[in-house]
Image: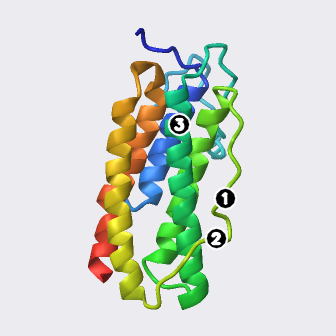
Amino acid sequence: MSPRKIAAPLAPSLMVLATLSLAACGSDTMATPTPVASTSPTPTTTPTPTPTPTPTATATSTPVLANTISALNTALDDERKAVATYEAIIAKLGPVAPFVNIVDAERRHVEMLLPLYTVRGLDIPDDIWAGNGTSADTVQENCALGVIGEIDNIAMYDNLIASLTSDDQDIIDAFVVLQAASRDNHLPAFQACA
């Protein structure tokens, strides 16, 4: 299959999301934006920083494979389950580390997946996990469960990535970023407190 051409506004936006997601998940390094050459004169005043753009997406006219929809739904469901679980732990045990940091990262992971639906003209599934998370009795027990959950998450992304084609490169790229956050940030944090 030939690679799908991604709408110009979407590809840079996904790169921004990927960079921000890794940085927000605890990455020690953050990519420095490459300056773009300009043909306009250099302003004499310092420009005001602009906010990070929201991903722009337009629906594709290419039919979306059932396997692609399934992969997106599986990833979104897993990220939403993580949010609900960590929210339940915080509700039960208070704002304890590492859950208070990781729940914010998981929320960003959910937000990273949503434009992948929009660009394909797909409806975003309802969140069945909102308010339905569970918690063990202690931080240590929850950390041990977090280790298992992150190992499962890493394996899930291996399977989902392998199931996609080059037509879904934007999804693959997002899944690689989310998997790296689990492997490189969340798993070590849970291992440290288990």
* Label 3 vs 1, first from the N-terminus: 3
Residue at position x 32%, y 50% in the image: 155
Q: Is residue 33 visible?
A: no
Q: How many labels does the image show?
A: 3
Q: In what element is the residue under mark 3?
A: helix
Q: Distance between the residues labelled 3 and 2?
A: 22 Å
Q: Is residue 66 left or right of residue 186?
A: right
Identify residue for label 3.
70
Q: Residues within 10 Å of mark 2 (few under 14, many from 20)?
A: few
Quadrant the N terminus occupies:
top left
Quadrant the C terminus occupies:
bottom left
Q: Callout 2, which amino acid?
A: Asn
| Residue 4 spot, x, y in % from top left | 49, 15
* 29 or 141, nearer to the observer: 141
The tag on residue 132 is 2
| Callout 1 touching callout 2 (CB < 8 Å) | yes
Q: Callout 1, which amino acid?
A: Ile
